[in-house]
């Protein structure tokens, strides 16, 4: 089955059927989905237009929701469409087995929420502990938006909610309050995987250390530190000088398309953490996760939380489908 590309900027709800051509399918920069789908389009104010039915997604025996499968995943889009597509690509490819369908999903990607998250991220580019007043005033609006998306996905038939966005997890507790279905936390997913890996400390008699590299907004939120520490890990963060002179400045050359300059700064930050005897470094930033080339030896010491979230989502979906 070939993929049809649909370019809608806001809300996309899909049931992906991959069959045996998945490995040959190319993802559209916005999203690639098959003919069996429904697209809901929201304008810049977040108002829905009439849904456009592409083919038989709406089931005659399920009038209250778009999808009725027990393993349906609801996805709250994050700070960029590219990160949403990256997560979907992994979810679809990794959940497809020997020509079987991938798991059903509902994606809610709202440009209004993306702008709010991006503003929050930009306001955090000052040094840790020096966020300005506007940085603190946007929280309520973001929380309400996230809750609205969660409720929308629940009503659409999602049995599990995920957010493939680091900064959104700053308000995971608030967004998940009152949720009637599973709501995975990316920090818990990566901490669980590291625990199951049964790593050994690099220095005898020392605790098992995990490095964390992220933006000020994510480090200040503290959810990765909390989830890792709850599993018994010691979390090592870049110090203020490293943040001020490598991590934060790396964003500027990245924005100027100076990829090599951004890569060099990232390598310095990674080396700072690795010399402190950390077993692995969590790269918790959409800005830097794809900077290093795939053959860079430093990547062997890094983990992407988005990967952990995708794997945990697939495990949940398989258990739900099997009734376990």
Image (spheres, grey):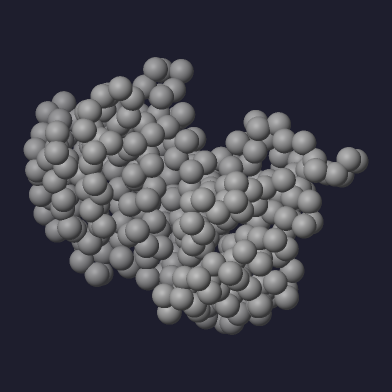
The answer to whether residue 157 shows anywhere in this view is no
Image spot of residue 17 (x, y percent): 21, 32
- For the N terminus, which image quadrant? top left
Disc count in the image?
Answer: 0
Q: Is residue 323 left or right of residue 26?
A: right
- Residue 118, horizontal then vertical, whole percent: 43, 70
Q: Nearer the viewer, residue 65 or 129?
A: 129
Question: Residue 50 appears at what percent x and percent y?
Answer: 11, 54
Instruction: Classify residue 179 by image quadrant.
Output: top left
Q: Is residue 154 above or below residue 100?
A: below
Residue at coordinates 20% horizontally, 44% vertically from top-left? 33
Instruction: Please tell me whether residue 250 is drawn above or below residue 302 in the rendered image.
Output: below
**Along the line of sight, which residue is nearer the eye, 228 or 30?**
30
Looking at the image, which residue is at 9% across and 38% down?
55
Q: Which residue is at 37% across, 70% downward?
A: 115
Q: Residue at x 43, y 79 (%)?
A: 256
Q: Position of residue 136 (x, y in %)?
A: 56, 74
Q: Is residue 243 visible?
A: yes
Q: Nearer the viewer, residue 264 or 269?
A: 264
- Of residue 200 and residue 44, the one placed in the foreground of this image is 200
């Amino acid at each position: 089955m070939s993929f049809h590309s649909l370019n809608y900027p806001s809300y996309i709800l899909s049931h992906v059927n991959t069959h045996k051509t998945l490995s040959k399918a190319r993802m559209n920069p916005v999203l690639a989905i098959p003919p069996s789908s429904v697209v809901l389009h929201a304008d810049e104010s977040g108002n829905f237009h009439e849904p456009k039915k592409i083919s038989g997604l709406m089931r005659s025996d399920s009038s209250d929701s778009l999808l009725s499968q027990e393993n349906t995943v609801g996805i709250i889009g994050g700070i960029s469409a590219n990160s949403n597509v990256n997560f979907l690509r992994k979810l679809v490819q990794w959940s497809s087995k020997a020509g079987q369908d991938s798991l059903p999903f509902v994606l809610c990607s709202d440009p209004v929420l993306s702008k709010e998250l991006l503003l929050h991220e930009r306001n955090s580019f000052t040094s840790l502990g020096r966020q300005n007043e506007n940085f603190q005033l946007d929280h309520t609006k973001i929380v309400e938006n996230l809750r609205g998306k969660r409720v929308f996905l629940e009503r659409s038939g999602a049995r599990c909610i995920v957010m493939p966005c680091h900064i959104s997890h700053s308000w995971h507790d608030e967004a998940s309050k009152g949720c009637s279905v599973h709501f995975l936390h990316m920090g818990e997913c990566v901490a669980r995987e590291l625990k199951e890996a049964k790593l050994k400390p690099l220095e005898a008699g020392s605790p098992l250390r995990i490095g964390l590299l992220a933006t000020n907004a994510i480090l200040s939120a503290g959810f990765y530190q909390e989830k890792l520490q709850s599993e018994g890990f010691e979390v090592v963060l870049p110090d203020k000088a490293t943040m001020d002179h490598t991590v934060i400045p790396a964003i500027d050359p990245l924005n100027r398309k100076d990829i090599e300059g951004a890569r060099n700064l990232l390598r310095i930050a990674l080396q700072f953490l690795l010399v402190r005897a950390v077993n692995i470094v969590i790269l918790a930033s959409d800005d830097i996760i794809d900077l290093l080339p795939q053959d860079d030896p430093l990547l062997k010491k890094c983990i992407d939380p988005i990967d952990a979230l995708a794997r945990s989502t697939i495990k949940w979906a398989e258990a739900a489908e099997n009734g376990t």
